[in-house]
Amino acid sequence: MWNYSEKVFDHFMNPRNVGEVTDADGVGEVGSMACGDALRLSFKLDEEGRIADAKFQTFGCGSAIASSSVLTEMVKGKTLEEAAQITNEDIARELDGLPREKMHCSVMGREALEAAMIDHYKKLGRGVPCHLMQQATLLCHCFQVTKDTVREAIYNHRLEDIEDVTNFTKAGGGCTDCHHDIGDMLRDCWDKIDRGEAPAPKAAGPLFQLGEMPARVEVEFDPADAEIVNRIREHLAEDVSVALRSDGGDIEFVRYREGRVYVRLTGSCAACKASDATIKGYVETQLREFVRDDLEVVEVDT
Amino acid sequence: MTEPGNKSFNMMEGLPEPPAKGIYFDNNATTPVAPEVVEKMIPLLTEHFGNPSSMHSFGARAGDEVAEAREKVQALLGASQTSEIVFTGGGSESDNLAIVGTLHAKPRKKHLITTSVEHPAVLGLCRDLEKRHGYEVTYLGVDERGHLDLDELKQALREDTAIVSVMMANNETGVIFDVETVGRIVRENGSVFHVDGVQGAGKLPLDLKSSSIDLFSLSGHKLHAPKGVGALYVRKGTKIRPLIVGGHQERGRRAGTENVASIAGMGVACELAGANVTQENTMVRDLRDRLESGLLAAIGDTQANGDPDCRLPNTTNISFKFIEGEGILLLLDRVGVAASSGSACTSGSLEPSHVLRAMGLPFTLTHGSIRFSLSRYNTRDEVDYVIKALPPIIERLRLITPFNEQRATF
């Protein structure tokens, strides 16, 4: 049984703004019956360009219905630019949190909103802002990994299963919703590899360097914690950092105090809008799994 | 921020008040422990707590209890000897012991066969054997009614096939496999035949001694015994290596001090199950049929899954088109009804039921599937209550969904 918050239950039991706005300025549809979640979101703007009304229809679980419902409330009164700022975390926060496995439900809310906005801009004949277009090429929404990145990794390293793809690209390491897509992509790529139509793997040699420790400068911890700190650093260096570097980012260990691991994301991770998901969904999960299950990971500003 | 006025949509509208006592229709997941079983177990936890291996009367009493339970399990299964019964920690352990134990006893054979609709205890193990231990596994498919193709099995059998593992009845749909015929084919090939009988035991009559089954898994908590106890039937002469080593218990086939109270409880549960098999196939079957026909009549765009003429008497698996199972379960729970779903969202795996997918059901039907599994403790009033409570739930969820008969996909 999922541990849903009272607020999730409230929005599930009494969903707000069910249906479709008549004469909508934008309609967005994401998901499908096949993937088990689908959301149709429509909105109407007032004269000032603010969202006057928004309605939804959802095929999905309790939290999908709740996050759709709460999103329609959140966007009302906002301009499109303001509404575009709403993140998955905002939606989850508004619901007093969602179970980790259910974070993809709030991803769907934001995607539908973006799809509706794209629809709106297209209707107006205006260019679609680039931050909205990026969505279409994403495979893993939790970590914002594109299809191209995953395909390239499969070809370059001849990855054979989803676990490998996650280790190399992070894709699929969060909500796991894209595992189906990754599986399909693995099959496609291997069909091509078997037929000799795939690009050759990268030049021989070690795939990545192991054991390269993050910078040791400015590291703070109580000497009594030396053992746990060593284990954390080892895991960060050997696993986490390897995965992040394949994205052009990296992670630095900053300090450790009373079960809290302070880290800094660098490179492309630093600017990534999914950095919250990276920290909580990936780094923290990894450290809890392999080092100690009560560790909390905190991001330090760059 | 929040507009208080917009509360017009209330999921609970038209739903009945939940009954004082919850209605439990999820007996394929686990069952309530029978009062007679509890009664048997309590003194074995308090007064008669001995270790069966000990050389004193405490130990002797505990040993007697285990021996008595073994006889009762033997009787339910129709085994020829008590020595064919190995007590384990549950159904999953029995499946693991059967399959891994056989593979270890036949180290030169590297192939095994199972079906694509097995319980995760078998499927997950087979995937692990393939991935990490170099075994080759053939997964037999099923048709739209959930049945195996015996020709496919015949073609899959090889000289190096160590073991074939096929479930007696499916936990999700209740579809019963013809394990007797499967067993004869397997035996001709000289392979060991394992049956995961967790869902079948107690619901179908058993006579293992005159069957072609070599190994048969049983779980306590599916037949009103507690969780954490099970058994594996090992036909005399079938070689298996133990998984858990370190003690002489269970004739060296499962080390560890016997879980005396639970084993004794399972003995009583098996005795009760044997006495109630007829009731399962009359009273429980009638309740299930009443529930299924009532729901199919009351709700449109609905279908029952699995061969209706060859199912466990207690199970019905119904698909409700255009909606997702978790919402149905959450609302059913609000009105006091416990069931389960093949939907992806309820499992945490994000994959909908592998069983329904293997039967070729389209996604429109897999995500909205609900399994009701009854027991002899259910009543006609409970069935009638669910027939009344479910239609408004389905109706409400269908008002929210973007899909319908005209628009089945984006």
Image (spheres, coloured by chain):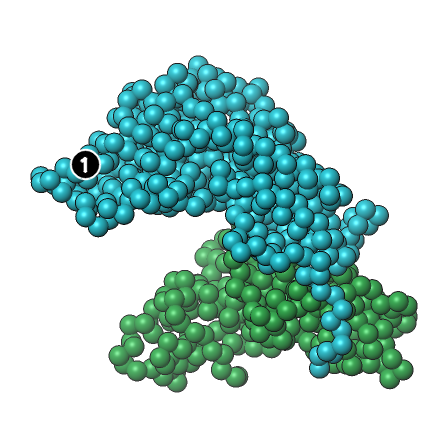
Mark count: 1
Query: What is the chain identity of the residue bearing mark 1?
Result: B
Residue at image position (62%, 26%) is B309
Q: Position of residue A236 (x, y in %)?
A: 42, 69
Q: What residue lies at 58% left-to-right and 70% top-to-bottom? A: A6
- Mark 1: give few (<14), some (14-19) or many (20+) Cα within 10 Å: some
Query: In the rendered image of this protein, does residue A113 appear above or below residue B323?
Result: below
Specify the amino acid type for callout 1.
Answer: Gly
Shown colour of chain A: green
Q: Residue at x 40, y 77 (%)?
A: A260
Chain B: give its colour.
Answer: cyan
Query: Residue B80, position in %: x, y?
Result: 31, 20
Secondary structure of the residue carrying numbered label 1: helix
Q: Is residue B391 visible?
A: yes
Q: Give x and y (percent) for residue A180.
A: 61, 50
Q: Is residue A251 above or below residue A242?
A: below
Q: Quadrant of the N terminus of chain B?
A: bottom right
User: Where does the image place residue A145, in percent across and percent down from the top left?
Assistant: 62, 63
Q: Is residue B355 left or right of residue B212?
A: right
Place residue A143 in its image quadrant: bottom right
Find the residue positioned furthest to the top.
B188
* Residue positioned 33% across, 30% down in the render: B73
Question: Mark 1 highlights which residue?
Answer: B63
Out of B123 and A60, give the one closest to the viewer: A60
- Of the pair B187 and B379, the residue shown nearer to us: B379
Q: Is residue A19 above or below residue A71?
A: above
Towards the viewer: A274 or A47: A47
